[in-house]
């Protein structure tokens, strides 16, 4: 299917395709049930990479994700660049909030009280802060 998709897009200005999968730590092979979704996903992307198709796979998840990838396919260690998001200090939180909205053509504005509230309530993870009204923090 991915090869078909790329063949349809190859003649367009499209430079590539990103497949983003959140909560990927929930993927896992289950040999006892003869189910190998993670291995299949890794094999497919290895195959299309070898064919030079510009696909990028982004997997996000809990720290259990990377060991599952390596368990599924030993080559997975070379396939991915792992990044761990860490807790930010107060100054870093402020920067994570304010720098993106200072970018040219950014339609978002943010008030100082909002910056203070996000910094205080996000626990050092302002990129995950949804506020009290959403039920998430």
Image (cartoon, rainbow, N blue to C red):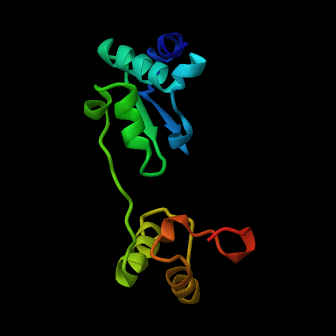
Q: How many marks?
A: 0
Expressed as whole percent of the image width and height from the top left, the position of residue 4 reads 53, 10
Compared to residue 58, the image places residue 45 above or below, namely: above
Expressed as whole percent of the image width and height from the top left, the position of residue 96 reads 41, 71
Q: Which image quadrant for residue 33?
A: top right
Q: Residue at x 30, y 14 (%)?
A: 50
* Residue 117 seen in render: yes
| In the foreground, 83 or 4 | 83
| In the foreground, 87 or 117 | 87
Q: Residue at x 52, y 87 (%)?
A: 116
Q: Dividing the image into 4 quarters, which one contains the N terminus? A: top right
Expressed as whole percent of the image width and height from the top left, the position of residue 77 reads 28, 34
Q: Residue at x 57, y 85 (%)?
A: 117
Q: Dividing the image into 4 quarters, which one contains the C terminus? A: bottom right
Q: Residue at x 38, y 74 (%)?
A: 88
| In the foreground, 108 or 64 | 64
* Residue 22 seen in render: no
């Amino acid at each position: 299917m991915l090869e078909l998709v790329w063949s349809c897009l190859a003649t367009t200005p499209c430079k590539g395709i990103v497949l983003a999968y959140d909560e990927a730590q929930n993927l896992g092979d289950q040999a006892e049930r003869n189910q190998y979704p993670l291995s299949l996903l890794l094999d497919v992307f290895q195959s299309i990479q070898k064919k030079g198709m510009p696909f990028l796979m982004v997997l996000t998840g809990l720290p259990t994700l990377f060991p599952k990838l390596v368990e599924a396919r030993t080559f997975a260690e070379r396939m991915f660049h792992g990044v761990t998001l860490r807790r930010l200090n107060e100054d870093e939180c402020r920067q994570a909030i304010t720098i993106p909205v200072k970018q040219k053509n950014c339609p978002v504005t943010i008030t100082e009280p909002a910056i203070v509230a996000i910094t205080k309530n996000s626990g050092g993870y302002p990129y995950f802060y949804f506020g009290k009204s959403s039920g998430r923090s």
